[in-house]
Image (cartoon, rainbow, N blue to C red):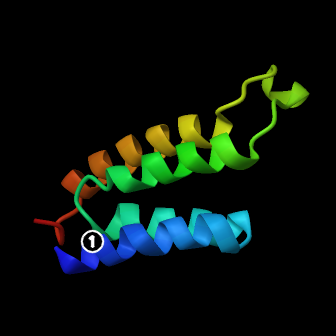
Amino acid sequence: MALRILAGVTLVISILFMPFWVTLILTFAGMIYFHIFLEAVFSLLLLDLLYGVPEAKFFGIFFISSIIGVTLLAAVEISKKKLKFYA
C-alpha cells in the first residue's frame, strides 16, 4: 500500500518537474506492476490539463494522452490476465 502511494506521489512530482516522457515511462511501469493502476489515468489527465494543446493531426482532440492511457490500461490489464506469472 505504501509503495502504491509512493508511486502516486512520484507521478505527481514527475508531471510537475520532469519531461513528459519520464511521466509516460513511469505510468506504463505502474500499469504493469500494480493491479488496476488508475493513478496512471488520472496523471495523464492532469498532464493533458496542464500541458495539452489540441493537435490538428489528431482532429483537434485535446485529451490525447488520457485516451491513450485508458486504452493502454485496458490492454495491459487484459494481457496480465492472459499471462501465467500474474496472479
**Quarter-of-image position of residue 7:** bottom left
The reply, left or right, for residue 10 in relation to residue 38 is right
In this rendering, the answer to whether 9 lies above or below 50 is below
Q: Is residue 31 depicted above or below 57 in this figure?
A: below
The amino acid type found where label 1 is placed reads Arg
* Residue 86, quarter of picture: bottom left
Q: Residue at x 34, y 49 (%)?
A: 38
Label 1: which residue? 4
**Residue 81, percent from left and from top:** 20, 52
Residue 41 to residue 25: above or below? above
Crowding at mark 1 (Cα within 10 Å: few <14, some 14-19, many 20+): some
Q: Horizontal placement of 67 versus 77: left or right?
A: right
- Horizontal side, residue 39 vs residue 65: left or right: left
Q: Quadrant of the C terminus?
A: bottom left
Q: Look at the image and tell me in which quarter the N terminus lies.
A: bottom left
- Residue 73 or 39: which is nearer the viewer? 39
Residue 58 at x, y percent in the picture: 79, 27
Q: Nearer the viewer, residue 84 or 3?
A: 3
Task: Give me the residue at 40% from left, 47% from top.
Answer: 73
For label 1, the SS is: helix
Which residue is more in the foreground, 64 or 5?
Answer: 5
Residue 71, given in percent of the width and then of the height, sits at 47, 38
Residue 24 vertical placement versus 65 (above, below): below
- Position in image of residue 12 (x %, y %): 51, 65
* Residue extending farthest top: 59
Residue under the point 45% across and 47% down:
42
Q: How many marks?
A: 1
Q: Residue furthest right?
A: 56
Please report the residue visible at 29 percent of the width from the left and 71 percent of the height from the top. Answer: 5
